[in-house]
Image (spheres, helix red, strand yellow):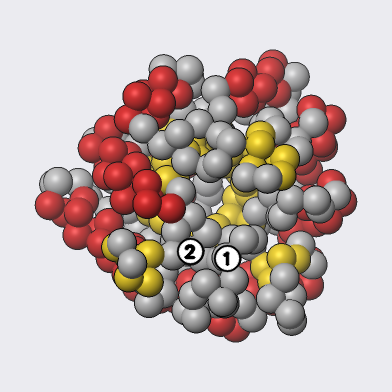
Amino acid sequence: MEKLIITAALVGAEVTRQQTPHLPLSPREIADEAIKVRVAGASIVHLHMRDQFGNPSQDKALFAEVISHIQTETDLIIQVSTGGAVGMNAAERVAPITLAPEMASLSTGSVNFGDNVFSNPLPMIQEFARACQVHHVKPEIEIFEGGMIQNALTLVKQGLLHAPLHFNFVLGVPGGLPATAKNLLFLLDLIPSASTWTVSGIGRHQLSMNTLGIILGGHVRTGFEDNIYYRKGVLAEGNAPFVSRLVNLAQTLDRSVATPLEARKLLGILPL
């Protein structure tokens, strides 16, 4: 198997300090958290930002500040979110791509998201894909439903995405595909054979989906964006414990963990 790439989604757009006091919010706190997950074994950090009140923000200046800290102090691959938060417009969501990070998430379809709808109409998806091309950003195709894979393949035909693609299967979102082994295998059957892939499990499904990802030869995402509990009823004291657990699990399963440089090579990203 390829070496395992661990992505740490440090903040997300939904979790609050009321839910966990360990959530990093300021650019400096997020950068410090990135340093900790790098030491623990992560190769990629997936970034959302928060404003001074703790609300989700796609403010380009906030992203620039935390990216500067992380690039100066680590060798991590930085992956910005173009999802932002439900209700944000396209201009807000695409702004961080103009900073030319190495990676960005790209959701290729709309999905019910709890009581809301995470809206991604085709013209918006095409706009985000073009922005990735212009700024030489590697997209991570974010998949909540099977039809989103077909949308991604359509973008390949249109010349807006280029193989080999890298997918992230986000399973267990209320309104999206449930986090089951059967559904993960179903999605894997739909992607081109040369693709790389990561799996993210929401809430209590995080560890089981990550375990399947390790066993099946894929890659994994963990962190506060997806889950705040280390085990039932026990809050994780930061993102690093999640990463350390996956490193230990991978070692138990005789699978090596990729460094950021090795992850760049696996994903086709040129090294810094």
Q: Work out whether residue 56 or residue 158 is closer to the camera in this orientation and state it.
A: 56
The location of residue 269, given as percent across then percent down, is 52, 46
Q: Residues within 10 Å of mark 2 (few under 14, many from 20)?
A: many
Vertical arrangement, residue 201 with respect to residue 146, above or below: below
Vertical arrangement, residue 66 with respect to residue 140, above or below: below
The location of residue 179, given as percent across then percent down, is 41, 37
Instruction: Judge left or right: residue 115 versus residue 165.
Output: right
Vertical arrangement, residue 238 with respect to residue 202, above or below: below
Instruction: Judge left or right: residue 66 versus residue 249.
Output: right
The location of residue 161, given as percent across then percent down, is 67, 29
Q: Work out whether residue 22 or residue 155 is closer to the camera in this orientation and state it.
A: 22
Q: For numbered disc 2, what is the local secondary structure?
A: loop
Q: Work out whether residue 263 or residue 141 is closer to the camera in this orientation and state it.
A: 141
Question: Residue at coordinates 69% horizontally, 49% vertically from top-left?
Answer: 83
Disc count in the image? Answer: 2
Q: Name the residue under label 2.
A: 224
Q: For numbered disc 1, what is the local secondary structure?
A: loop
Q: Mark 1 points at which residue?
A: 15
Instruction: Judge left or right: residue 202 versus residue 251.
Output: right
Question: Residue at coordinates 80% horizontally, 51% vertically from top-left?
Answer: 87
Circles 1, 2 touching at the beta carbon (< 8 Å): yes
Question: Residue at coordinates 53% horizontally, 48% vertically from top-left?
Answer: 270
Which quadrant is the N terminus positioned in?
Answer: top left
Name which of mark 1 and mark 2 comes first in the sequence. Answer: 1
Residue 140 appears in the figure: yes
Amino acid bearing label 2: Phe
Amino acid bearing label 1: Val
Question: Residue at coordinates 57% horizontally, 65% vertically from top-left?
Answer: 15
The location of residue 50, given as percent across then percent down, is 69, 71
Residue 156 appears in the figure: no
Vertical arrangement, residue 27 with respect to residue 12, above or below: below
